[in-house]
Image (spheres, coloured by chain):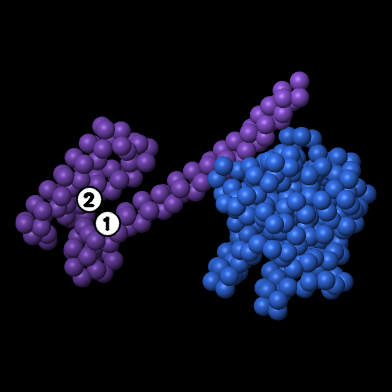
Chain colours: A purple, B blue
Amino acid sequence: MLSTSLKTAILVAIFIYFVILVLLLKQKRLALRYTLLWMFSGLLMLLVTIFPQILEGVTRLLGIQLLSNALFAILFFCVLMILISLTSIISKQNESIKQLVQHTALMEKRIRAIEEKDERL
Amino acid sequence: MKTLVIIPAYNEQENILNTIDDINRHCPEMDYIVINDCSKDDTEKILRENRKNYLSLPCNLGIGGGVQTGYRYACENGYDIAIQFDGDGQHEARYLHDLVAPLEAGAADIAIGSRFIRKEGFQSTGLRRLGIGFLSGMIKLLCGIRVTDVTSGMRAVNRRFIEEYARSYAQDYPEPEAIIAASVRGAKIVEVPVQMRERQGGKSSINPVRSVYYMIKVSLALILAKFSSKER
C-alpha cells in the first residue's frame, strides 16, 4: 500500500503539475498538440495514485518488490515516450528548416538575376 | 544535353575560382552553379564580385543539404544531367566528359568517378581506404552492385535521379547512402576511372572521432535505406 503521506504528496505534486500545464497553455507558451502526451502521463499518475489497486496488480504481475518502484517504472516509461516524441518533432522541424533554407536560396538567386537584368536596362 | 555542374563549397575562398576556371576550360558547354553553404570566409564575396553563378544558403546545411539544393536548381531549370563536383580542388574537370559519357549514351542512370579502378593519382590514406572498402562491401551485400569508391563526391546523374534527389537526399555524409537509395529505386550505376588530387587548400572536415561516428552512422543508414526507401 501507498502510505497516506506519500499519497497526499503525490496528489499535491500532480495538482501543481496540471496547474503549470494549464497556465502555460493559457499563455500560449505551449502548443496543445505537443502537450497531449504530458497530459496523458499526468492522468495516468492520477489514476494510479487514486486507485493503488492498479499499481498493486502491476507490481505483482512484474514481480517488483516495492510499490513505489513500480510507480517510478511507469513514470520513467512516460518520460521516455515524451522524449522520443520530442526527438521526432525536432527531426520534422529539421526537415522543414532544410527545405525553407533551400527555397530561400533558390528565391534569392532568382531575385539577383532579375536585379541584374534591371541594371542592364 | 543540357548539363549542370553542382559545386558544393564551404569555406573555399582559395579554391573556388580555380575550380570554376577548370570546368570552364575543359567543359565550356556545361553550366555550373556553386552552392555556398553559408561559408564563414570570403567565398560569397568572391563569387559575387566575380559575377559567378551561385546559390547562397542562409544557414549551414552540410554537404547533403547543399548538394540537394543544387539538384532542386537543376530540376527547376530543366537540366538533363547534373554532376556533383567538389569545390575544394580535389576533382579534375578533364574527367567530366568521361563521366557523362555513359549517361549520354543511355547506358546508365548514375556514373561515379572512382580513384580505385586504375589506382592512379591520390589514393587517400590507408585507414580511410579500409573504411571505404568496408562500406563498399556493405553496398555489395545489400544491393549486389560493385562500387569501389563509395565516398566519391564526383558523380553524374540523369534527369530521373535529379528529380529523385531533389525530392529526398541524405543529410550528413550522404555519398554512400545516395548510392543505395538510388539502387533500390532501380538505378543503373556505373563507375568511371578518374584521378583525384589531394586537397589544394582549406581544411578537410574529417577527424578521428568523427570517422568512428561516420562509420557507425553510415552503416546504419545503409541498412535503413535498403529496407525503407521503397515508400515515400
Q: Locate the C terminus of chain A by quadrant.
A: top right
Q: Quadrant location of residue B63?
A: bottom right
Q: Quadrant location of residue A76?
A: bottom left
Query: What's under tag 2, amino acid-wise?
Result: Met
* x and y percentages locating residue B5 in the rendered image: 79, 47
Query: What's under tag 1, amino acid-wise?
Result: Leu
Q: Who's the residue at 89% across and 43% down the image?
A: B29
* x and y percentages locating residue B83 in the rendered image: 79, 50
* x and y percentages locating residue B224 in the rendered image: 61, 59
Q: Is residue B51 left or right of residue A6?
A: right
Seen from the viewer's position, the closer of residues A114 and B95 is: A114
Q: Who's the residue at 73% across and 64% down the image?
A: B200
Q: Residue A75, which numbered label?
A: 1
Q: Is residue B190 left or right of residue B59?
A: right
Q: CA distance from mark 2 to mark 1?
A: 8 Å
Q: Tell me the subunit letter for badge 2.
A: A
Q: Tell me the subunit letter for badge 1.
A: A
Q: Which residue is mark 2?
A: A45
Q: Are marks 2 and 1 in contact (CB under 8 Å)?
A: yes
